Amino acid sequence: MQLERIEISGFRGIKRLSLPFEQLTTLIGENTWGKSSLLDALSVALPTSAEPYQFEMRDFHVDYAISHPQTQHLQIVLKLRASTRKEALSGRYRNIKPIWNECSNNHSEIIYRLSATLEGTKVTTHYAFLNAQGQPKQLHHSEKLAQQLMLLHPVIRLRDSRRFQRVEDSAPRANSKIEQRIKNTCRRLISHPGLVSKDEMKSSVKTMHDLVDHYFSYKPQVRHDPRATRDGLFTSGLAQKMSLKQFVDQTQDKQTRLLLMGLLNNYLQAKGNTELRRCARPLLIVEDPEGRLHPTHLSRAWALLQMMPMQKILTTNSAVLLGAVPLRSIKRLVRKSDRTEAKYIRPEMLSSDELRKVSFHIRFHRSSALFARCWLLVEGETEVWLFNELAKLCGYDLASEGVQIVEFAQSGLKSLLKVARALDIDWHVVTDGDAAGKKYAASARAMLHGEQERHRLTELPDKDIEHYLYNNGFEKFFRDMAKIPYDHPIPAKKVIMRALKKHAKPDVAIAIVEYCEIHGDAVIPLLIRWTLKRVISMANGNT
């Protein structure tokens, strides 16, 4: 069974949110935009302890921005769908048979709702299961059925181990001794690595094999569609071909074993003292795994996490990790005045060719662009250098303002604009005045959707950026670069060609910036200054 969707209303930092889930869902978004509240909602709905959560006053949403009173009602609705047609009839779901709904496509689903009301200082919590029409089912023991669902599909939240509270294990459990052995070894490796003997490491590795066999020996019930478009070049198929247990049995790399031991220790701490049933199918939340890992180790850790057979939700601020996940798994949370929206690329938005180009250009070269508030889309390498450095001379720091300069000549403009629209990233295009530039400008105009053209598009009045600068105060600069006297009659085209033959384009761009530093920012052409001001205001308006 797989979590298909969550609906949240009035819970902590979220006023309203509807979010679909895949086998892997990657959440990105700025601070205070609702990621932590979303993960908290999943954790309280399906806790590993299987103890029904009782809401408190602090769980109700307060909109401080417009001084609204605290919300008096909250609810969290989870929709879970069977992975196969016969899954609902399997033995593990025998105790929760009354909560299943039959769908028109012969698949079964569960709609599980937690809600609470606030009256004065009194908070009342309700557990219910809904039918296909959204009405509560008449069940006398909804809370007990919810506990059974928690035991079968608990949410395990992996995060920085320093944030876990150490709880003493009072009741003996089947795996308590071997789990404690892993925890003790990891603790000693962190505090006194030189005191861990080879025998202790061998014993812990053997213990790790046993725990992996206990917790991760099942296979995910996910059907692979051979007709589905391959999402880029970077999603490895190793996780589908080899189970985690097989990998542990075969690997001889000491660093990989240590890393896996650390991940397993983190998993055990997140699970707490609860003894998971062998038939349990947890939902794994991986929260900002880049916090304490070098990018090389982060890539290796993600390869191991991919082998874990459960459904996964990943949050990250790492461009390295974002470049390793499928583009279609990325959900960008955007906070509006009355709701939080989940923005993502739907399957029908991009053709297979567009998906390949965007996956390579954005995910491989500029994964950090997916975190940006606004894209400044330019044609070539010279513009990337120039706009970034000239912005600093004008007093703007594009990175800190959330502006990313993206070169579109290799991947095509139209596909990038589709991605920006899908993820709710603002954009502004700068095109040359030649024939190719006019085609790019036409593509940008086709994506305006009723907006003013000057808000989205800047067309240079000359054939390229070099000719524009030449005609707007930089004639002497280019003549100096080409070593041509000021009074020598020669067309601008030949002056620029000679300058670019003597110097590479990046060198010319750097020389232009140095020229502006010497003569002051007043020499920067007005159109460039206006474009920079426009994208900064767009980024600030998208906070």
Image: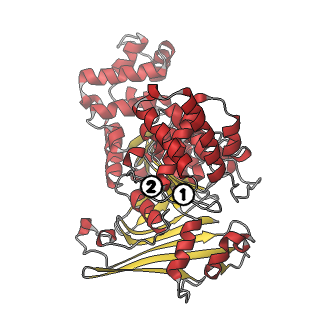
**Who is closer to the viewer here, 286 or 475?**
286
Say what amino acid the circle numbered 2 marks: Asp
Residue 453 vertical position relative to residue 85 in the rendered view, above or below: above
- Residue at x-position 39% and y-position 19%: 478
Question: Is the residue under label 2 in contact with that under label 1 (CB below 8 Å)?
Answer: yes
Q: Which mark is residue 173?
A: 1
- Residue at x-position 35% and y-position 13%: 487
- Residue at x-position 44% and y-position 45%: 317
Regarding residue 440, the answer to whether it shows in the image is yes
Position of the C terminus by quadrant: bottom left
Say what amino acid the circle numbered 1 marks: Arg
Regarding residue 434, the answer to whether it shows in the image is no
Residue 223 vertical position relative to residue 500 in the rendered view, above or below: below
Residue 519 vertical position relative to residue 309 in the rendered view, above or below: above
Q: Residues within 10 Å of mark 2 (few under 14, many from 20)?
A: few
Task: Return the x and y of residue 362 as percentages of the image width and height.
Answer: 54, 41
Task: Return the x and y of residue 290 as percentages of the image width and height.
Answer: 46, 40
- Judged from the image, the secondary structure of the residue bearing numbered disc 2 is loop
**Who is closer to the viewer here, 123 or 370?**
123
Q: Which mark is residue 291?
A: none
Q: Quadrant of residue 241?
A: top right
Q: Is residue 446 left or right of residue 170?
A: right
Q: Which mark is residue 169?
A: 2
Task: Return the x and y of residue 56 as percentages of the image width and height.
Answer: 32, 72
